[in-house]
């Protein structure tokens, strides 16, 4: 049984936390009525998560609540590819072969979407005029796992989105809205993997993976501090009891080298200078990771002005909902609400 959609519920589920917002509905204009966060630790059970979500929305007994959800399935992918010609971009066989041969993604085992890198819209093979494409998706089994997990939480996703892409779309729209001319380095770092993106004036120009993530840090941390095992290193890493400021550059050296290689190549290739970095997903207690990356690359940390951006999307914020202290990691949740293709219509209504 599904509950009546009198209110909107938006949920972003990462390995670190659940970010959730109740809104006045799903249609613009809407109002954000309440936001909450539930940090996720090992052993969190679905009943506890459902109880957290019930604090935001009326589940009416044992019913499912229809929600819009963003997830980070394992082995998700977002890849940029520039086709030689528009005609090739319209050839389904060529695109399938590119996915298989260039990115080692099996189209049969993965759910795949192709986007226009210029504006994030679905690529139209019939009428598409863009040579710059983004292949994105995840293994079908991984997406099914995420959907089943949401059902355990009491959520029925009427729209299930890849948070990596949703967040990137939000940053692109934010860049357009604020007239940011310089390229922005966007970085998603999770336990097993990481992704590097570079967008300029709302268009994605680089999207590539790093085949390792935070898990790669624990062996070094174990050696540096003489800990008994990697599990102890992981526990310390996520605690708020140790100051990693001095050790940070050494722990993150492998990651920052990858970022330096990507940004350096891009700047030489395009003649453009990146001046800021946006890091998504990471919880507040890993803020030292963001600062270390920023310092190592000599880039300013991008802290979005969420209030003005949301207002430009026809999304109001209720009294008592404070956005000023929220970090960049909330961009994914709020991006689930935005209808970026309607920006011109929204702006014309406000004039």
Image (cartoon, rainbow, N blue to C red):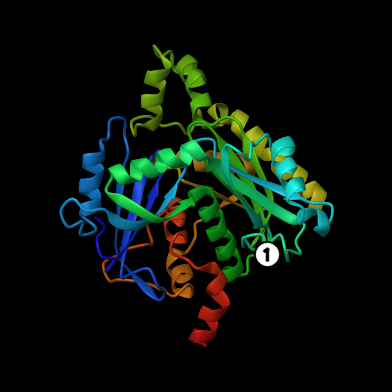
Q: Position of residue 172 (x, y in %)?
A: 59, 61
**What residue lies at 46% left-to-right and 71% top-to-bottom?**
308
* Image position of 98 with respect to 318: above or below: above
Q: Secondary structure at mark 1?
A: loop
Q: Is residue 97 left or right of residue 216?
A: right
Q: Which residue is mark 1?
A: 181
The relative height of residue 259 versus residue 172 in the rendered view (above or below) is above
User: Can you give x and y, in whole percent of width and height, for residue 80 in the image?
Assistant: 69, 48
Q: Residue at x 23, y 48 (%)?
A: 52
In the figure, residue 147 lies in which quadrant?
top left
Q: Nearer the viewer, residue 337 or 197?
A: 337
| Total count of labels | 1
Q: Is residue 190 visible?
A: yes
Q: Is residue 73 visible?
A: no
On the rendered structure, is 109 left or right of 314? right
Instruction: Please provide percent x and percent y for residue 278.
Output: 55, 51
> Residue at horizontal 61%, vertical 38%?
108
């Amino acid at each position: 049984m599904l509950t009546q959609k009198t209110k909107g519920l938006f949920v972003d589920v990462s390995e670190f936390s659940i970010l959730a917002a109740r809104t006045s509905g799903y249609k613009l204009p809407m109002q954000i009525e309440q936001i909450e966060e539930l940090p996720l630790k090992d052993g969190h059970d679905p009943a506890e998560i459902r109880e957290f979500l019930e604090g935001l929305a009326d589940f009416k007994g044992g019913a499912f609540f229809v929600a819009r959800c963003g997830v980070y399935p394992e082995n998700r992918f977002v890849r940029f590819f520039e086709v030689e010609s528009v005609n090739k971009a319209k050839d389904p066989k060529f695109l399938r072969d590119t996915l298989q041969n260039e990115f080692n993604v099996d189209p049969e085992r993965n759910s795949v979407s192709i986007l226009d890198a210029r504006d994030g819209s679905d690529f139209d093979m019939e009428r598409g005029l863009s040579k710059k494409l983004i292949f994105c998706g995840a293994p079908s089994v991984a997406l099914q796992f995420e959907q089943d997990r949401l059902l355990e939480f009491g959520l029925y996703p009427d729209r299930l989105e890849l948070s990596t892409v949703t967040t990137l779309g939000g940053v692109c729209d934010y860049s357009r809205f604020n007239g940011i001319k310089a390229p922005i380095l966007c970085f998603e770092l999770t336990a097993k993997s990481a992704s590097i993106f570079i967008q300029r004036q709302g268009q994605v120009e680089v999207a590539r993976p790093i085949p390792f993530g935070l898990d790669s840090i624990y062996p070094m941390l174990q050696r540096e501090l003489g800990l008994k095992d990697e599990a102890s290193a992981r526990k310390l890493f996520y605690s708020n009891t140790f100051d990693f400021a001095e050790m940070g550059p050494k722990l993150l050296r492998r990651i920052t080298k990858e970022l330096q290689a990507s940004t350096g190549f891009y700047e030489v290739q395009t003649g453009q200078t990146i001046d800021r970095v946006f890091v998504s997903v990471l919880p507040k207690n890993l803020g030292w990771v963001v600062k270390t990356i920023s310092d190592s690359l000599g880039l300013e940390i991008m802290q979005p002005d969420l209030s003005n951006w949301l207002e430009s999307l026809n999304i109001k914020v209720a009294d008592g909902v404070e956005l000023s202290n929220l970090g960049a990691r909330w961009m994914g949740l709020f991006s689930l609400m935005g209808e970026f293709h309607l920006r011109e219509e929204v702006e014309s209504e406000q004039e």
